[in-house]
Amino acid sequence: MIEKSTPAPITHAADADLIGPDKSLLIVDDDTAFLRRLARAMEARGFAVEIAESVAEGIAKAKTRPPKHAVIDLRLGDGSGLDVIEAIRGRRDDTRMIVLTGYGNIATAVNAVKLGALDYLAKPADADDILAALIQRPGERVEPPENPMSADRVRWEHIQRVYEMCERNVSETARRLNMHRRTLQRILAKRAPK
């Protein structure tokens, strides 16, 4: 049996050295319980955390004090986390940003990365996963997932990508995928398969 080498777990004492001199972190999420829990966990790891519960609040904080690090939920009550990414990138181009979402799909991940996010993590992501993504060095290889996507998930991701490319137009997406519009609507109404 081949043993898989795993990186040593990040300890809270060592975290401060890995973060760098600017420890500012903006967390934007509309799930208050998750937001507060993550903020406490990241403070324990050495970050100077600011929180925002909406796109408007996130943009306002990004404009007044652009952070060195950011963790942004993609879907917020008042809009898209991509708007916060753009606002941060407009003020500071060295910000290390991670996008979190419970509604992951490849199209939005690609958009987030194009706008400057380093990584895209599906909720629930724990603080250690987020920290590892934030401190990852450019060009560093990420370990492949132990549980790769199922065929159903890959299909769902493809449908979501085409749907986003068609600007969320169900009829056009159905035409391009050569499927009935109602079938597509049923697929889109379901959560992503595991």
Image (spheres, rainbow, N blue to C red):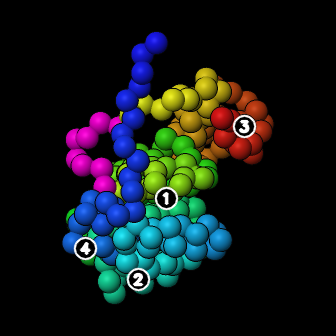
Q: Earlier in the sequence, mark 2 or mark 4?
A: 4
Identify the main secondary structure in magenta.
loop
Tag 1 residue: 127
Mark 1 vs mark 4: which is more N-terminal?
Answer: 4
Q: How many marks?
A: 4
Q: Which mark is first along the chain, 2 or 3?
A: 2
Tag 4: amino acid: Asp
Residue 136 is covered by the magenta coloring: yes
Spatial separation of the CA atoms under disc 3 and disc 1: 32 Å
Residue interval drawn in magenta: 135-142
User: Where does label 3 land, which residue?
Assistant: 187
Q: Are marks 3 and 4 in contact (CB under 8 Å)?
A: no
State the separation of the CA atoms marked 2 and 1: 22 Å
Residue density around tag 1, few if under 14, some if 14–19, many if 20 or more, within 10 Å: some
Quadrant containing the C terminus in the rendered view: top right
Q: Position of residue 119 (x, y in %)?
A: 39, 50
Residue type marked 3: Ile
Closer-to-camera residue (99/137): 137
Residue 77 visible in this rendered orientation of the protein: no
What amino acid type is highlighted by mark number 1?
Answer: Ala
Task: List the residue tagged with mark 2.
Answer: 61
Identify the mark nearer the N-term, 3 or 1: 1
